[in-house]
Image: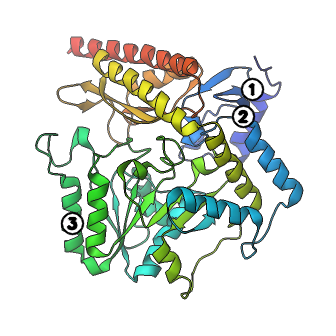
């Protein structure tokens, strides 16, 4: 048990007094004073140990304080802390080569995060094609900078609209709530064919790219049907449109492969990544482009740059982190535990009245909660919450399990090296919370 921190109250108070917290009304924030961590757990200033069931922001894939990643950072600091983006370095060459190998693409442009990677992917697509429009999806999140935020369908874009021009949105492969009213038996993959109609209505010669997440992350973890990406790839090829694959959350072992789209046998034109690239140990993102795009910029000006592009310490962290994935066989671990997690989730779907749907791929999973399984009425409205969701989240937090919940959904995305015992412990707490929600919903129905 870690020791309590003597100044926890002061630390929290000064954080609130002198810093701003993202995506929140400031006087409603109640941050945890985090003091350290190890593996699948972190510690707070009151001496509590928390099970990290969301890998912080679904990025701490190798867990807290992995010694091999720490050592890679320390070794690089001793050699060179910074080199400008116009310099060649050994770590830049090593990581660039590795990313080309694991993605099947050609060259990387390094950023400090996923949003910057997506900004540069949009810019790259427009420069390469000479076209302006980019098709994205409504249930998507691509980052908080202006271009990436505009590209997102997520309601967090609303306060910054109208944003950048040229974004056109399409519907998602949301099979549980099909926007086209289809069932699995009647589906003709309208989630792809309607994009072709959008292309025709917007003008094929105007569209630079279609940008989608490999598997939708913070907007519901929408696992697409197996033929979705092959059909989308064919559609892009038909009209000469680039396919940008945002793997910021779904990449680097989260689903058991380097990229989520590798499950579906397709190769994007551009891949963006961050989060699991360094497991959050240092800020780093990357935009990785195909051979044809890389070749184009051999003779055309690349209009883009960042002071911290190719930061040596961040690159070293990534190299160390990718080595951990391979040395510890964590992708196989993600797949193996993911199968077990899927079985547990399916059992929850059958057992609890409030569980409408479960979606999962590897250790990337979500539970969608409803008031009624027949009507599929959400337990909380879109972009909102409810007393039941508050009860669910509150119970899980009271047991010192750190979970990500949003709208009518709660995620299970632990570090890839979590033990089965810790996974079971967290799932047991989730089941306690689901039972409480069932009681609340049943009581409300009885009262009616």
Compare marks 2 and 3 and give the one earlier in the sequence. 2
Q: What element carries label 3?
A: helix
Q: Most extreme residue toward the left, as rendered? A: 186
Name the quadrant containing residue 237: bottom left
The one nearer the camera, 169 or 75, is: 75
Q: Position of residue 77 (x, y in %)?
A: 85, 54
Q: Count every numbered label the image shows and give the total.
A: 3
Q: Residue 329 carries which label?
A: none
- Estimate how packed mark 2 is, as few (under 14), some (14 to 19) or many (20 or more) residues with alpha carbons within 10 Å: some
- Residue at 33% x, 12% y is 439
Q: In which quadrant will I find the N terminus?
A: top right
Q: Distance between the Cα atoms at labels 2 and 3? A: 51 Å
Which residue is tagged 1? 45
Mark number for residue 196? 3
* Marks 1 and 2 in Cβ contact (< 8 Å): yes
Q: Which residue is drawn at 23% across and 16% down?
A: 445
């Amino acid at each position: 048990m870690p020791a309590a921190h003597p100044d926890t109250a002061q630390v929290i108070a000064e954080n609130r007094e002198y810093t701003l917290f993202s995506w929140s009304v400031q006087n409603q924030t109640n941050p945890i004073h985090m003091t350290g961590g190890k593996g699948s757990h972190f510690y707070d200033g009151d001496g509590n140990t928390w099970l990290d069931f969301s890998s912080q922001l679904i990025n701490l894939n190798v867990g807290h304080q992995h010694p091999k990643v720490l050592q890679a950072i320390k070794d690089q600091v001793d050699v060179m802390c910074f080199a400008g983006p116009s310099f060649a370095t050994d770590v830049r060459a090593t990581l660039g080569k590795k990313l080309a190998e694991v993605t099947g693409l050609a060259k990387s442009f390094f950023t400090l995060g996923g949003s910057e990677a997506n900004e540069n992917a949009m810019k790259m697509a427009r420069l390469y094609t000479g076209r302006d429009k980019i098709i994205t999806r409504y249930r998507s999140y691509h980052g908080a900078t202006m271009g990436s935020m505009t590209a997102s369908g997520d309601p967090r874009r609303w306060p910054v609209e109208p944003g950048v021009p040229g974004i056109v949105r399409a519907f998602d492969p949301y099979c549980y709530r099909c926007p086209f009213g289809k069932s699995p038996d009647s589906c003709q993959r309208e989630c792809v064919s309607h994009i072709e109609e959008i292309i025709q209505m917007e003008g094929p010669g105007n569209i630079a790219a279609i940008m989608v997440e490999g598997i939708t992350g913070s907007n519901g973890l929408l696992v697409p049907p197996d033929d979705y990406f092959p059909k989308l790839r064919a559609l892009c090829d038909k009209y000469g449109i680039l396919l940008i694959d945002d793997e910021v959350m779904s990449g680097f072992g989260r689903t058991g492969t380097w990229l989520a789209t590798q499950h579906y046998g397709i190769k994007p034109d551009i891949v963006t990544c961050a989060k699991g690239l360094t497991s959050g140990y240092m800020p780093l993102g990357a935009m990785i482009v195909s051979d044809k795009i890389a070749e184009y910029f051999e003779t055309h000006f690349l209009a883009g740059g960042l002071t911290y592009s190719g930061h040596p310490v961040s690159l070293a962290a990534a190299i160390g982190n990718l080595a951990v994935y391979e040395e510890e066989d964590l992708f196989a671990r993600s797949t193996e535990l993911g199968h077990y997690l899927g079985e547990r989730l399916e059992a929850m779907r059958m057992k609890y009245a409030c569980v409408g749907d479960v979606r999962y791929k590897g250790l990337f999973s979500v539970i969608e909660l409803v008031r009624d399984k027949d009507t599929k009425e959400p337990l909380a409205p879109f972009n909102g919450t409810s007393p039941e969701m508050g009860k669910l989240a509150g119970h899980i937090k009271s047991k010192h399990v750190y979970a990500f919940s949003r709208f009518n959904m709660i995620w299970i995305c632990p570090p890839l090296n979590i033990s089965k015992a810790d996974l079971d412990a967290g799932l047991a707490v989730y089941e306690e919370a689901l039972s409480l929600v069932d009681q609340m919903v049943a009581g409300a129905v009885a009262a009616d």
